[in-house]
Image (cartoon, rainbow, N blue to C red):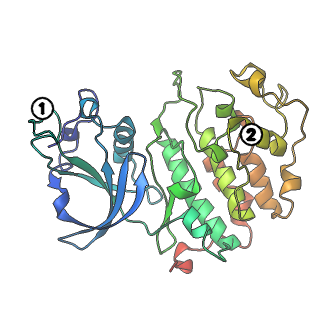
Amino acid sequence: MAVAAPGQLNLDEFPSWGSRGVDCFEKLEQIGEGTYGQVYMAKETETNEIVALKKIRMDNEREGFPITAIREIKILKKLHHQNVIQLKEIVTSPGPDRDEQGKPIDGNKYKGSIYMVFEYMDHDLTGLADRPGMRFTVPQIKCYMKQLLTGLHYCHVNQVLHRDIKGSNLLIDNEGNLKLADFGLARSFSSDHNGNLTNRVITLWYRPPELLLGSTRYGPAVDMWSVGCIFAELLNGKPILPGKNEPEQLTKIFELCGTPDELIWPGVTKMPWYNNFKPPRVLKRKVKDAFKHFDRHALDLLERMLTLDPSQRIPAKEALDAEYFWTDPLPCDPKRFAIV
């Protein structure tokens, strides 16, 4: 049984987890490199079920599990939803008794490897979108967006911020079902939480302005900005805010969404990095001009997602009620566009 450093992750909290070895699975191929280890496609030898194995790198055994792995395991243990990736179990493999120099390894350190076992998903949204000649239909986009918002609403209701919404973290199976994955940067929060959170989260192209301006007190609205970027990307066929660095990212946001001031975003001028990144001239909001080829219901929803003031940004539940999802063409049933 693997035991992490005190106060970190104790597998005894999950009786059936950690009781099986990785030899219950046959590794078929490496399919990716996660935040903290390799990801393999594997087959359970007894049932022939295909799963994904995420190996947790134990580079510094003295500190136990990487904090990102601990958070992901604890959060996924409490999330059960058809649009959130399922963590099935934790399995272990024994390690050597001696190090490379032949010295006995400290018995207090866990010497083996630890793997997270996930349900297997065939694709991710970025990989699908990058296929030559691939262009999603409006019913498909509505279907994916509805599933993304449904899964995210469930996370937010359960007081979890994902903090890394992007196409490669949205997994899709061959039946068209979409699931939120990679909770390595996720965080539990409470509505009365007054503590500071890191603003060094969310991949740059999908990072909201409040984080780029140094905010350390934020909530579910950070994920909704990322969803807006994904939405526009699906409709537009390419990323809408591809900044090379943080100053350029903010510039691109201001060029599209306008320069923030106290009128449209109360408190913005007091944000930690506002004076560092204040644009030299006033820029007008031009989301509607930039995407005038979008359907008007899509544009209305996008405007509410890409709202600079996070307190005014549309939440997931409200977005699901937007006219966009209730007007023709309607979102299609995932099973109606099987992916091959």
Q: Where residue 245 appears, x then y in whole percent?
A: 68, 39
Residue situated furthest front in the rendering: 101
For the point 89% across and 54% down, the residue is 289
Asked if residue 164 is positioned above or below residue 216 in the image, the reply reads below
Asked if residue 244 is positioned above or below residue 298 in the image, the reply reads above
Disc 1 marks a residue whose amino acid type is Asp
Asked if residue 49 is positioned above or below residue 265 in the image, the reply reads below
Residue 255, picture quadrant: top right
For the point 68% across and 21% down, the residue is 272
Report crowding for label 1: few under 14, some 14 to 19, many 20 or more residues within 10 A (C-alpha): few
Of 42 and 265, which appears nearest the observer? 42
317 relative position to 10: left or right: right
First in sequence, mark 2 or 1: give its number: 1
Q: Is residue 267 visible?
A: no
Tell me the SS state at disc 1. loop
Residue at the spot of label 1 = 106
Disc 2 marks a residue whose amino acid type is Glu
For the N terminus, which image quadrant? top left
Residue at the spot of label 2 = 248
Tell me the SS state at disc 2. helix
Residue 224, picture quadrant: top right
